[in-house]
Image (cartoon, rainbow, N blue to C red):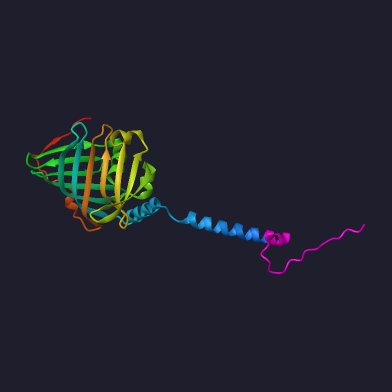
Amino acid sequence: MIKRVRFRLTKSGSNDSRALRPPERLRMGLIAFAVHILVTHAAWSQPTPLQQVVEQMDRTAASFHTTQASFEWKQWTAVINDFTDTQKGKVYFRRSGSQIEMFADISDPAPPKYVLFTGSKVQMYQPKIDQVTEYDTGKDRATFESFLVLGFGGSGQDMLKNFDVTYVGTEKLDGADTAKLDLVPKSQKARNTFNHIILWIDPARGVSVRQQLFAPGGDYRLATYSQIQLNEKISDSLFKLKTDSKTKFLSPKG
């Protein structure tokens, strides 16, 4: 008995993948794998919103010399469930060597007072009573400065070293989009001062336009900045309190 054997001929150009020879199937598989790798790499290489904010802060910090701005500082007291203090004025930052100096002119409410941070000391001068109250940050200077420079001369990389940072999204402030960041200090010592911070960053300039700093007990300070000027010349005399021989100096402990 003779068995009939049928042969099936596949036309050239057929879409039937079963007709591909093993070397051809291997070549097509490699091409598909290469395309997948390229697409995946392109997706991975796109910076995240947080990375974009950090990079802009790094660029701002690299060229930072001075910043000046108008401010409104409001203090929220948890037990009262309301704001209990509001201060307005002008604030100035400048880089002095490897350190940041700050001077605040608090003009409202009257009478005016001034706050200076330089070296390791924070000094508050009240001209009306001709008195300076000063605090030495000492070994806690680095912790104090890590809060001070957030969005004002501090780099994004330094922020990531000192805080666990989460990108929350964007929010409009005064009609402009800002990047909203949620920060938790990495060190316990820093969390004893502020255990949670929200920053609103101007993504175009890499500076902070609002800060909300939460104390462990639920109180917080809300700081809003406007009319921000970068790298404008600031007189050296601004970073010296105008005291005299009659000025009284107090140094509270603790």
Residue 240, how many percent across, how many down?
17, 47
Left/right of residue 125 with respect to residue 12 in the rendered view: left
Residue toward you, 136 or 198: 198
Residue that appears at 76% across and 66% down: 9
Asked if the magenta segment contains residue 19, the reply would be: yes
Can residue 214 be seen in this snapshot? Answer: yes
Check the image and name the residue furthest to the right.
1
Left/right of residue 176 with respect to residue 21 in the rendered view: left
Residue 89, how many percent across, how many down?
15, 49
Asked if the magenta segment contains residue 9, the reply would be: yes
Left/right of residue 226 with respect to residue 131 in the rendered view: right
Residue 204, how many percent across, how many down?
31, 58
Residue toward you, 7 or 201: 7
Check the image and name the residue furthest to the bottom.
12
Asked where in the image residue 193 lies, by quadrant, the reply is: top left
Check the image and name the residue furthest to the front.
1
Residue toward you, 254 or 240: 254
**Quadrant position of the N terminus in the picture:** bottom right
**Magenta segment, principal secondary structure?**
loop
Image height of 227 relative to 123, above or below: below
Can residue 150 be seen in this snapshot? Answer: no
Q: In this figure, what is the number of numbered marks? A: 0
Residue that appears at 19% across and 39% down: 75
**Quadrant position of the C terminus in the picture:** top left
Image height of 70 relative to 19, above or below: above
Residue toward you, 127 or 39: 39
What are the residue bounds of the magenta stretch? Answer: 1-26
Residue that appears at 37% across and 44% down: 165
